[in-house]
Amino acid sequence: MKLVVLGLSLSSSWGNGHATTFRALLKAFAARGHDILFLERDVPWYASHRDLPDPAFCRLAYYADLAGLEPYRGAIAAADAVIVGSYVPEGVAVAGLVQAWAGGVTAFYDIDTPVTLAKLARGDHEYLSPAAIPGFDLYLSFTGGPTLARIERDYGSPAARALYCSVDSDAYRPTGAPKRWDLSYLGTYSPDRQPVLERLLIAPARALPAMRFVVAGPQYPADIAWPANVERIEHLPPADHPDFYSASRWTLNVTRADMVAAGWSPSVRLFEAAACGTPILSDRWPGLNELLAPGTEIVLADDGDAVAAALADPAADAIGAAARARVLAAHTAAHRAAELDGYINEASQRPGQRVTA
């Protein structure tokens, strides 16, 4: 199969989780024998933070603007499938070009589904418009559950399918790194996540001064009052993630508000931490129990007392091992690549339902 992907970023993981998601998925998709071209908008904030400028599993090319896509028109037309990702700059216009040029299956891969739907509900068409959705043969969604039926019912998608994030199980595994922190958190600053981070990491750090904590990720405001026992790492490239998780006795999963409301929206960090065998403390949201079993594969925490209890739990290693086994059995990039293969083949055999915007 020839696949063309137009995504937010493959080359840079700075300030976004898209790169990690695409890297794992496309590496596994290429391992199935497929040929991949990834087209990335050349923007300065990623150009200055590229940590994978030359991937071994696909061709990566940059374009400066919409006109810069013209040289790739033939590749888009000849591809068996073309995927446009969420948050692509000028995404509505990019979708229009893809739907006009593509000869094969077209898909929108939404790695931000609850955020996207919230934006559409308020008339914000930054990277997707309601009119563009029926023009894609597939709506591949970061979010599963009832949201899929909503996308088909309310927005006219011919087929909405869950394509959760996943983990590259070759890259993410226990490394044996010495334990440095009692509780870690890895994630870019987000205003709607910050109150939960305050409640489940910063407040416990103040209450447990003998323990060690760390928050890794960019864009945190300078006025945050970090306790003395909370280490800050401004940016942690993906190559360092396995050591980071392996050096953590526990790690924290915090979910954006829109994704909590929608449910069934696992972060890539959830699978990556589990693959490293690190026990996970998480906030609550619908559908999480279908991915990891609370109490045996993950621990849910509502407040600092629950965090303190988990940090004192002698069963932590068993919880981490159980989560790793579950993720390796169902949530690796190889599993997602097989699902994507199946969705594309299903769409290619469906009678023409696409309505060009």
Image (cartoon, rainbow, N blue to C red):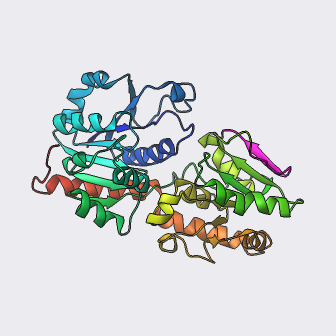
| 28 left or right of 324 in image | left
Picture coordinates of residue 302, whole percent (x, y): 66, 71
| 47 left or right of 207 in image | left
Q: Residue at x 64, y 40 (%)?
A: 218
From this viewpoint, is residue 250 visible?
Answer: no
From this viewpoint, is residue 145 visible?
Answer: yes
Given the current orientation, which residue lies at the most extreme left position?
A: 351
Q: Main secondary structure of the magenta part?
A: loop
| 122 left or right of 203 in image | left
Q: Which of the 4 image quadrants contains residue 294?
A: bottom right
Question: Quadrant location of the C terminus?
Answer: top left
Relative depth, front residue between 286 and 313: 286
Asked if the magenta segment contains residue 191, the reply would be no
Given the current orientation, which residue lies at the most extreme front position?
A: 122
Given the current orientation, which residue lies at the most extreme bottom position?
A: 295
Mark count: 0
Vertical side of 75 occupied by 282: above or below? below
Picture coordinates of residue 298, whole percent (x, y): 62, 71
Q: Which of the 4 image quadrants contains residue 155?
A: bottom left
Relative depth, front residue between 58 and 186: 186
Picture coordinates of residue 274, whole percent (x, y): 60, 61
Q: Which of the 4 image quadrants contains residue 271?
A: bottom right
Span of residues in magenta: 224-235
Question: Quadrant location of the N terminus?
Answer: top left
Picture coordinates of residue 131, whole percent (x, y): 22, 47
Q: Residue at x 15, y 39 (%)?
A: 103
